[in-house]
Amino acid sequence: MSEVLVVGAGPTGLATGCLLRAAGVDVRVVDRRPELSGPEDSVLLWSATLGALGEIGVGPPVQLAGRAVHAARYVDRGRVLARVPLQGEHPHLQPVVLGRATLQRLLCERLAQLGVRVEWDTEALQIGTSGHGVSLVLDRRGHRAEAGAAYVVGCDGADSTVRGAAGVGWEDVGAAGDGDSAYAEIEARTRLDASTAHVFRSGGGVVMLLPTAAGTWSVVGYARDLQWGPRPGTAQLQALLDSCGAAGLVRARRVVSFVPGDGSRGVAATYRAGRLLLAGAAAHAHPSRGGEGLNLGLQDAHNLAWKLALVVRGAARDRLLDSYDAERRPVARAALRDTAAEERRVLAGESRMARWVRGSVPAQLRRDGELEHRLARAAVADADYTGSPLTTGSRLAGADHVPGRPFRVAPGVDAAAAVRGDGAITLVLVAGRDGPAATLPVLHAVADRHAPRVRALAVPGAPGTGARPAAGYVLGVRPDGHIGYRGPASDRGSLEAWLRDGVGLLPGRG
């Protein structure tokens, strides 16, 4: 019996397998497809996603194979609202456009390097759970065999077999507009900046154009009354571009590929049903193919894998897995609600009030610089887990680290020294003006009780400035890089309580 069985070898399933195996978990990955396959539609990979891919070990090849996007330009009815730089925390976190199939290939190769081969042409059937594990039947080309695992992660798409076996339904996230979505890749004649994502919006719809590594343009559109045939031509794509406000700026020359949107949207009612867990498209469905669902799925894997690794190795209590649903499901719900609201706004009527709001509010935001700030934050920001059951600690005077947000270090301190991607929690002492000498041995003593799942580290001062607060403080940095705990350096009791009661670590285990 394996420790974890991952059903589905798309990007989310492959990433989950890589992260689990790197943490020492015995993992199997199965997929009902006969071989690695899938559309080469281009997606924009966000900075937070690239951080997870870097931890997996495919960061450099992803950057090499993709096309960096340095800015996003927003145009509403012919008027430029903003051009927003999309610079992440580090150069290797610059958002990139990459083909989905290329990403799958890189992840599959990395999984093989870690010693796990995808079991293709293998379908999971008759999934059942007990207090001790999961039993199922694997069908490989008509030959059936019983199998078992401590946990099963369903990454098997919108028609997930695992979700069905768990009896988990879809949750309503609010109605969208009455338009349709579509994805295409085109060759085009245009003078648009090929290092920028361009978003055009008008009363007819909204379209995003992404430059691809192949020199083509990825088109993700949403508009009213799209009437597509089985093989739409350049005239239909041009009509979409024109109706969304890109008339005269982009001339479609050839349609390389086209996929109509199916309108699917929704969030699973829970991401966990006992020993069955859901991630990626099995947990949330998104109407467009611009990459939102893929990014969220890869971040699901990054959130889940370290928790699952601690639990299956006996280093943490099973209830740690409840935080996966508590942290990731609200992220997908918020993304889908925002998408639906934007679709309704795009197709809203031309009332006097609507024209005033669309005209004056963005203008005011533009003058204040807030619009650019909001758009850039949406493009490069990590998930915010400030409301998570794993997050504790209040803001301290002179401290820039916020519980629930990603950990950042002072200039000259390598972040990789704190978060190494090996599944361990790092206790970081941010030294006060008196230095770390008095507290660091205590921190090491706490870490030693949970070694090797916890380690201790000291850094000088606050991030970005190196300024030393009056008193030092301690951070509990999760394996996914988010801060779970912050408290005074002198408060060992609260730190121990967070590790024991918050994370659920078992001393001396794993």
Image (cartoon, rainbow, N blue to C red):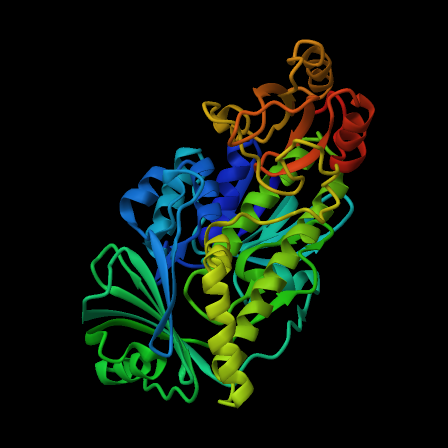
Instruction: Evaluate whether residue 359 shows in this view.
Output: yes
Q: Residue at x 59, y 44 (%)?
A: 303
Residue 306 lies in quadrant: top right
Q: Nearer the viewer, residue 12 or 447?
A: 447
| Quadrant position of residue 430 | top right
What residue do we see at 29% from left, 85% from top? 239
147 displayed left or right of 13: right
Quadrant position of the N terminus in the picture: top right
Question: Relative to 301, is 492 above or below?
Answer: above
The front one of 252 and 354 is 354
Residue 288: which quarter of the image? Answer: bottom left
Q: Is residue 1 visible?
A: no
Q: Determine whether, in the image, residue 369 is placed left or right of residue 277.
A: left
Figure disc tally: 0
Q: Residue at x 58, y 49 (%)?
A: 383
What quarter of the picture does the C terminus occupy?
top right
Along the line of sight, which residue is nearer the eye, 150 or 265? 265
Q: Is residue 426 above or below residue 255?
A: above
**Left or right: 491 in relation to 172:** right
> In x, y percent, where is residue 27?
55, 39
What is the x, y in percent for residue 71? 35, 55
Q: Position of residue 224 (x, y in %)?
A: 43, 86
Closer to the camera in the image, 14 or 492: 492
Residue 270 location (% of width, % of height): 70, 60
